[in-house]
Image: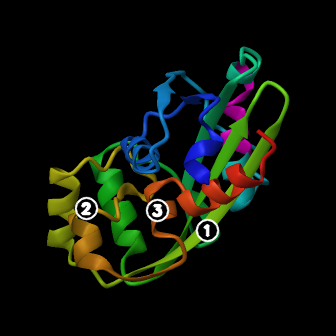
Amino acid sequence: MFFKKLENYKVLLASGSKRRHELLNGLKVKFELISQEVDESYPEKLKKHEITDYLAKKKSIQLKKLLKKNELLITADTIVWFNNSALGKPKNRNEAVNMVKYLSDNFHEVISSVCISTNKTQTIIHESTKVYFEKLSDNDITYYASNYDVLDRAGSYGIQDYIGYLGISKIEGCYNNVLGFPTSLFCKTINKMKL
């Protein structure tokens, strides 16, 4: 059973994402938060999950060296992939408005990678979900960008927010992956690991 797999481990989560905190809490995983500053640049030649795999691993590098025997570290990264390029977090609200306008009336992929590290092993998993947006009005986009926490979100939106209720017509794949953490794949992976 999944919830027993991590009983003998101190789980460390190196992520400031409130959604990831909520999802791990929903899985009844007890964890301790670790904060760190990581340069989130990556080689330009990388595409899709290569980017998130690279960044999830990059976020683990310094911390993995410090892991003790019964500690398990989780690092993660999420991007929006659209028009053959990656959309990260917007720098300001104007950029957020333009990003959501760009995604309107089309579909994109949300790709998340999770890096699971112990002092002896490291496993990187990734998941992709297609998200379809209706055509959104400029007024709705501006209202959203002015009243919600868009700066902390890849692609400038949260599926669980106003714009998600209003604009998303369907998704193909894991909902929680769009929140930034593919819970089902994570559980399957932990269950297969020799912990």
Q: Which mark is residue 17?
A: none
Left or right: 24 as drawn, with respect to 82: left
From the image, give the main secondary structure of the stretch colored magenta: helix
Q: Whole-percent x and y of residue 127? A: 64, 64
How far separated are the C-alphas under marks 2 and 3? 14 Å
**Relative depth, front residue between 29 and 113:** 29
**Relative depth, front residue between 134 and 169:** 169
Q: Whole-percent x and y of residue 117? A: 73, 34
In the rendered image, which quarter is residue 187 located in?
Answer: bottom right
Residue 125 lies within the magenta run: no
The residue depicted at 60 percent of the width and 52 percent of the height is: 2
Amino acid type at mark 1: Ser
Mark 1 surroundings: few (<14), some (14-19) or many (≥20) residues within 10 A: many
Q: Earlier in the sequence, mark 3 or mark 1?
A: 1
Left or right: 174 as drawn, with respect to 161: right
How far separated are the C-alphas under marks 1 and 2? 20 Å
Left or right: 180 as drawn, with respect to 26: right
Which stretch did the figure color magenta? 54-62
Mark 2 surroundings: few (<14), some (14-19) or many (≥20) residues within 10 A: few
The residue depicted at 72 percent of the width and 49 percent of the height is: 53
Quadrant for the N terminus in the image: bottom right
SS class, disc 2: loop
Q: Whole-percent x and y of residue 76? A: 59, 43
Tag 3 residue: 176
Tag 2 residue: 161
